[in-house]
Amino acid sequence: MSRRTAVRGGLVITAADEIHADILIEDGRIAALAATGTPAAEALTAEHTIDATGKYVIPGGVDGHTHMEMPFGGTYASDTFETGTRAAAWGGTTTIVDFAVQSKGGALREGLDAWHAKAEGNCAIDYGFHMIVSDVTEETLKEMDLLVEEGVTSFKQFMAYPGVFYSDDGQILRAMQRAAGNGGLIMMHAENGIAIDVLVEQALARGETDPRHHGEVRKALLEAEATHRAIRLAQVAGAPLYVVHVSAREAVAELVRARDEGLPVFGETCPQYLFLSTDNLAEPGFEGAKYVCSTPLRPREHQAALWRGLRSDDLQVVSTDHCPFCFSGQKELGRGDFSRIPNGMPGVENRMDLLHQAVVDGHISRRRWIEIACAAPARMFGLYPKKGTIAPGADADVVIYDPHAEQVISAETHHMNVDYSAYEGRRITGRVETVFSRGEAVITGREYTGRAGHGVYTPRATCQHLD
């Protein structure tokens, strides 16, 4: 049985256009699009009609950086694939790309299989995987080729976390050379982890144990230095590079320089760097622990460079790096020693709304909002035009968004499985009303109507920013 839904009268916003249009959803796809009030629009017939007058109709968000059930520092991220993808849907995100983890001494395949087992049958929205490469060997390099062929087309490496995920420059170069050959994209956590560990040790020896010291030892210059080094290694390898969670203006400057040279270098930032700062890390008592993530929050003056990078396309994507740990019992592991606070913050539910607030505040345009939150991540990770846009043939991942509704962000009302909000009490304008994932309503008029297992694994093409 064909199921057809018409969404009528809304302002359809994509990265390229804004048009008052009616949309026909059929069999999980966008079947047609026609300007409202035209004969073509009136010819769109459906069993079910939604009136979107006065609302935006936008593509579902694509969050290219999440960590559900991620093991870290002796504990696990508090969102499961079930709770995390449900929260994502509440926030207007209809696709996530999560990170499968290779264990030291293990095969990429083992890590990928483990993440498939966690996700399968549990997700409310569609999902894909990147692969964290933490042990570069000849076998690993061969496996990278196989993974690209089956739709896992991006590989994350770490210049941080010695003894856990860390790769040295030689290992990074080998992986980049392999990616240059197989079409994969290397994603880099760019911080000089060796130097940072020295600064951590020295700070703790001085008795500097509070959460704010986490930001002070992970210096902006060490993010910039690692970003520069990653860019030059990629240049030597002839490979593209995607730098994750860029937080410092000095690191943005390195990306700008590389892109001005014509290098295929891309950058992502996250809402926490755009809306929060070291003021949060310095909150009294142990409250600052809620804001411990890596790269760390920076002084507020760094935000201007991030917004400028987003406007000028030197930063292409805003993802969340959603990796929540409860304050009670998890963040508290670091009382008396900031280096033991699990690194990560919740945000998968807040990204689309916070970026709409950036539109309201004049930082970005409406189309740029959709570009950085939907279209660019879909292209970056080989999901476009199936995801990230509203066009005939695309998956019917469609959000009806009320740009005038006001809300107050709070842990009391969010759906992430974490006991605090990083944006507690923040008043914002704009709210998700209804969300379709492949034509199925998962949020209907501010009620959850989805189910675990609706979301399916989505293999990806290679990076479409390189075509």
Image: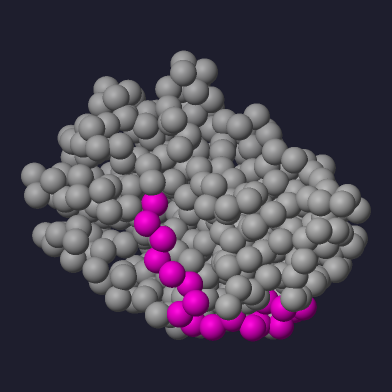
Q: Quadrant of residue 279?
A: bottom right
Name the residue: 57% across, 66% down.
28
Is residue 464 at least partly visible in the picture?
yes
Q: Answer above or below: position of 243 versus 23.
A: above
Q: Nearer the viewer, residue 187 or 21?
A: 21
Say which quadrant the C terminus sits in. Answer: top left
Number of dots carrying numbers: 0
Tell whether position 453 is magenta: yes
Report the magenta residues as a range.
443-460
Lateral position of residue 333 relative to residue 49, left or right: left
Is residue 289 at least partly visible in the picture?
no
Say which quadrant the N terminus sits in. Answer: bottom right
Name the residue: 90% across, 60% down.
54
Seen as rendered, the residue at the extreme top is 261
Q: Answer above or below: position of 23 versus 455.
A: above
Q: Quadrant of residue 311?
A: top right
Lateral position of residue 174 relative to residue 29, left or right: left
